Image (spheres, rainbow, N blue to C red):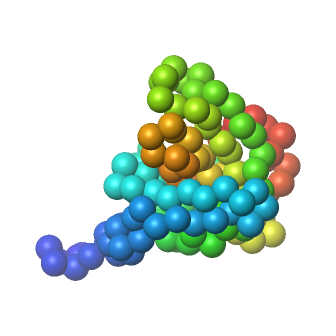
């Protein structure tokens, strides 16, 4: 059992990401530069995001490890989809981009990036899927 002062894996990754917030990360394939803020960190580490990855056959720690590696994953990801903000109908949002990165031969990481007129490209969420066959099963 952890003591009150002992940090969880999520706490350690949150601190790491907070030290990197608002730093630009350039995607090699597209040249798109994106960053993440507190909102993106909270979304990537949220129980909802973790549970999506768990439903896809991963552990909480595997999801958190992928979030910890978001800089490398985004840098090497491939753009797979660009759409408008159909879910929220936000006038300030220019597009929603979905990138795909291979964490390993059996793990695909979906990275959602929102582009706004005000904040540019912001990394918003991460979801793990088992393999490339998952790519044909719909949106993350």
Q: Nearer the viewer, residue 1 or 133?
A: 133
Residue 132 location (% of width, % of height)? 83, 54
Residue 30 visible: yes
Residue 41 location (% of width, % of height)? 40, 57
Instruction: Identify the image quadrant of residue 104.
Output: bottom right
Q: Nearer the viewer, residue 78 or 48?
A: 78
Instruction: Identify the image quadrant of residue 102.
Output: bottom right
Where is the C terminus found, in terms of image quarters? top right
Residue 53 visible: no
Residue in the image at 80% along x and 69% along y = 105
Residue in the image at 62% along x and 52% along y = 111
Relative to 41, 3 lies left or right: left
Numbered label tally: 0
Relative to 129, 49 lies left or right: left
Instruction: Identify the image quadrant of residue 136.
Output: top right
Residue 61 location (% of width, % of height)? 49, 68
Where is the N terminus found, in terms of image quarters? bottom left
Q: Nearer the viewer, residue 20 or 92?
A: 92
Residue in the image at 52% along x and 32% along y = 93
The residue most toward the front is 117
Q: Compared with residue 76, is residue 90 higher up or lower down, i.e. above or below? A: above
Relative to 132, 52 lies left or right: left
Residue 21 location (% of width, % of height)? 40, 64
């Amino acid at each position: 059992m952890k003591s009150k002062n002992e940090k969880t894996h999520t706490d350690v990754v949150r601190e790491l990401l907070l030290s990197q917030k608002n730093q630009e990360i350039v995607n090699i394939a597209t040249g798109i530069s994106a960053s993440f803020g507190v909102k993106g960190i909270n979304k990537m580490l949220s129980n909802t995001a973790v549970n999506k990855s768990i439903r896809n056959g991963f552990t909480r720690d595997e999801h958190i490890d992928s979030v910890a590696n978001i800089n490398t994953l985004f840098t090497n990801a491939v753009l797979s989809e660009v759409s408008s903000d159909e879910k929220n109908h936000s006038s300030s949002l220019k597009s929603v981009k979905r990138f795909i990165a291979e964490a390993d031969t059996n793990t695909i990481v979906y990275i959602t990036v929102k582009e706004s007129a005000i904040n540019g490209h912001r990394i918003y969420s991460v979801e793990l899927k088992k393999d490339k066959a998952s790519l044909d099963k719909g949106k993350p």
